């Protein structure tokens, strides 16, 4: 299949549904059977037009997912890699996440999960650490949060 018109229409419809990275648009157009040259031209045109902007996407993704979902750097980095964002752009976007804000977010997530559970219980701490790790928080942050909660509950 070839032709810039149909490829652009499919790509624009795909982008209209939700913001997308260049790699996601490429994958979508490949699934539709377009030639690589058509895909490359279409993605370049959409990038020039400002409809695809991986850097803006990464910054918005990090801000949104860290705030609304309470995800940490590790999880955010993994998600952006799966979406095909370049590693230097990922690094820039993650640098915007302040370490203190990340610790505050991890603390809030931990407090929600803990409820009335006793932080002094090893099984509770282990479950909490595993949960925070799956949410993408670095181990240093997890240790700090658990220590802070434990010292404040005594």
Image (cartoon, rainbow, N blue to C red):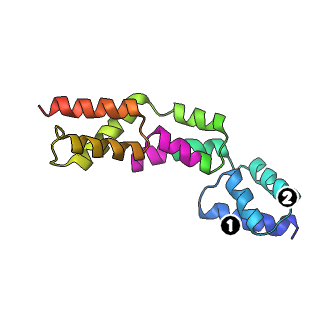
Residue 76 magenta-drawn? yes
Q: CA distance from mark 1 to mark 2?
A: 19 Å
> What residue is disc 1 on?
13
Residue 42 magenta-drawn? no
Identify the residue shown where x is 31% and y is 45%: 109
Q: Residue furthest left?
A: 154
- Majority secondary structure of magenta residues: helix
* Boundaries of the magenta span: 63-80
Residue 32: x and y in percent read 76, 69
Residue 93: x and y in percent read 56, 36
Residue 101 visible (yes or no): no
Nearer to us: label 1 or label 2: 2
Specify the quadrant of the image occupied by residue 16. Answer: bottom right
Mark 2: few/some/many CA within 10 Å (<14, 14-19, 20+): few
SS under mark 1: helix
**The C terminus sits in image quarter:** top left
Q: Nearer the viewer, residue 133 or 89?
A: 133
> What residue is disc 2 on?
36
Give the side of residue 122 with respect to residue 97, left or right: left
Residue 149: x and y in percent read 22, 34
Identify the residue shown where x is 17% and y is 41%: 121
């Amino acid at each position: 299949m070839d032709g810039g018109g149909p490829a652009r229409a499919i790509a624009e419809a795909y982008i209209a549904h939700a913001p997308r990275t260049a790699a996601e648009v490429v994958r979508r157009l490949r699934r539709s059977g377009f030639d690589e040259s058509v895909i490359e031209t279409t993605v370049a045109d959409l990038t020039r037009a400002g409809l695809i902007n991986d850097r803006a996407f990464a910054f918005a993704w990090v801000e949104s997912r860290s705030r609304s979902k309470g995800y940490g750097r590790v999880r955010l980095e993994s998600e952006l890699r799966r979406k095909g964002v370049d590693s230097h752009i990922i690094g820039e976007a993650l640098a915007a996440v302040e370490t203190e804000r990340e610790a505050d977010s991890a603390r809030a997530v931990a407090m929600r999960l803990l409820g009335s559970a006793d932080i002094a219980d090893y099984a509770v701490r282990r479950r909490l650490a595993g949960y925070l790790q799956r949410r993408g928080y670095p181990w240093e942050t997890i240790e700090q949060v658990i220590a802070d909660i434990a010292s404040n509950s005594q």
